[in-house]
Image: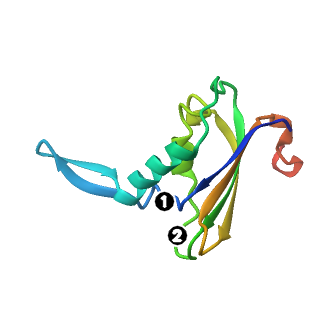
Amino acid sequence: MDKIVQFEVVGEPASKANSRKAVVIRGKPAFIKSQKARDYVKAFGEQCPTLPELITDDVLVEILIYYASRRPDLDESLILDCMQDKIYKNDRQVKQKKIYWGLDKDNPRSIIRIFKYDILNIPSYLVY
């Protein structure tokens, strides 16, 4: 497996599924990201490297998310969104994910590794 990039982002990601807030924009109801999610997106953008040439191939993403408490759901979707236009063109290129949960009350963070995707890396017990 060829590793393309590895980096760490300090901060606890918001759960994308649980981080929507109902608002009214120009008289119409809409859902926007919560303040926690918007703050994380900003912090992620400041810490995530921008590759000189975005990845255009399919990728495997491996993430270890350290949360500050046991309360949050394991949810990598905001992280995948944040890597668009910095690591890869679109998060639809993510064809395999390995997501792990960790606990670090003093230092919530995410360790992210991106690999070239290889369909041969699918465990044999999942293939017919």
Q: Amino acid at mark 1?
A: Ser
Horizontal and vertical percent for residue 69? 56, 76
Horizontal and vertical percent for residue 115? 76, 38
Residue 115: give its label.
none
Tags 2 and 1 touching, CB below 8 Å? yes
Q: Work out how far the residue at label 2 is from the one at label 1, CA to CA, in angstroms.
A: 7 Å
Residue 72: give its label.
2
Give the side of residue 113 with respect to residue 52, left or right: right
Q: Residue at x 65, y 24 (%)?
A: 56
Q: Amino acid at mark 2?
A: Pro
Element on which disc 1 rests: loop
Dividing the picture into quadrants, the one containing residue 116 is top right
Tell me: residue 27, above or below residue 99. Answer: above
Tell me: residue 76, above or below residue 104. Answer: above
Q: Give the quarter of the figure containing the N terminus.
A: top right
Element on which disc 2 rests: loop
Q: Residue at x 66, y 65 (%)?
A: 101
Dividing the picture into quadrants, the one containing residue 27 is top left
Q: Nearer the viewer, residue 8 or 19?
A: 8
Q: Residues within 10 Å of mark 2 (few under 14, many from 20)?
A: some
Q: Residue at x 57, y 28 (%)?
A: 89
Horizontal and vertical percent for residue 124? 88, 47
Give the side of residue 95 with respect to residue 68, left or right: right
Q: Residue at x 53, y 31 (%)?
A: 85
Horizontal and vertical percent for residue 66? 63, 65
Residue picked out by circle 1: 15
Coloration mode? rainbow
